Image: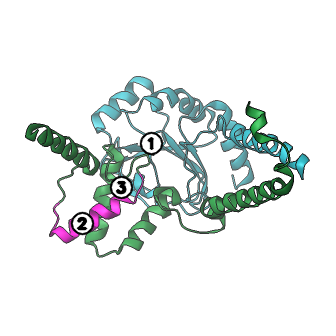
Amino acid sequence: MIRRALSMLLYAALIVSAGVAVAIDPLPFANPAEELRFQQLVRELRCLVCQNQNLADSDAELAKDLRAEVFELMRSGKDDAQIKQFLTDRYGDFVLYKPPVKPGTWLLWFGPLLMLAIGIFLARGQLRTREPSASTDDRDGEFS
Amino acid sequence: MRRLNFAMPLLLFAGLAVLLYSGLGKDTRTVPSPLVGKMAPAFDLPDLLDPTQRVSGQSLRGRVYLLNVWGSWCVACVQEHPILMRLAASGRLPIIGLNWKDEPEAAVALLRRNGDPYSAIAADREGRTAIDFGVYGAPESFLVDAQGRILYKHIGPLDWASVERQLFTRIEGSTP
């Protein structure tokens, strides 16, 4: 019983640790706060070589260079917004995992709401026509 | 309303089919560059063939050129190479190489073996200039006009059809 619980715990630990694995560069962080800020930043930036990975996870050569670039920008006193701007100036909004809200991305941001509205509209029409008349035709009979 | 309800799934299906069909065959990996139409980033790098010399954006002002990002480690660049040789032979557009994160010896050896289509080659060993140009994979080519503005960016190996359609048509429009 205890062995089983232990192995369950081990599996749980494995699953959790797999999620936080990041590519490790020997960057000389001054303190844990700086490292934390760096990790958060590179997690929000996309690797352009393997496009379904962020900069933190990617092992691509370019991702390594971009991480070094982000680190240097941090060191030179740039804030997060300026660093993201530096990258979008070169690579476009695509490097951001969270695209900015602007006319070009309205469909992306509000499309789901639009779909929901259409769905509600259709469902209402559907239900309204069904109410009195639908009860008259024998639904149980259809399946017998 | 009943009729509409009946037609609705069909209409939805048709809409979805059109949407998905339009996405077929599209290359989702090419990322449009925000640099097209803007001034090319400044660079000043050692010449690959003669490291005592520099190759800079400033020194190239006044002429239209193609900046070609390549490396001896890049298979697609080797595939593209004959097109660059043909373009160089046509004499219509000088090609400036940006040798990206490469070993100089390997790069020079490759050019000796296959020929050198470049008017000058800037050696970007650290890849910083490539980052300034928003390069994310080789080969990439930038058409730069006499004022130093990027007219067009080609991602991936050039073929002769795109040289004619994308490069020649654009340089005819600008100052010779």
Label 1: which residue? B137
Q: Tell which subunit mark 3 falls on.
A: B
- Locate residue B18: give its quadrant: top right
Residue B60 visible, this orientation: no
Q: Tell which subunit mark 2 falls on.
A: A
Pick the residue in front: B61 or B73. B73
Q: Nearer the viewer, mark 2 or mark 1?
A: 2
Residue A36: mark in rendering: 2
Instruction: Decide: is A59 above or below A55.
Output: above
SS type, badge 1: loop
- Residue depicted at x 8% and y 41%: A2
Label 3: which residue? B128
SS type, badge 3: helix
Pick the residue in front: B59 or B80. B80
Three-letter amino acid code at disc 3?
Answer: Arg
- Residue depicted at x 61% and y 59%: A108
- Image location of residue B140, percent across then percent down: 51, 43
Q: Colour of chain B?
A: cyan
Q: Which lettered chain is shown in green?
A: A
- Residue depicted at x 28% and y 38%: B103
- Image location of residue B25, percent across then percent down: 65, 34
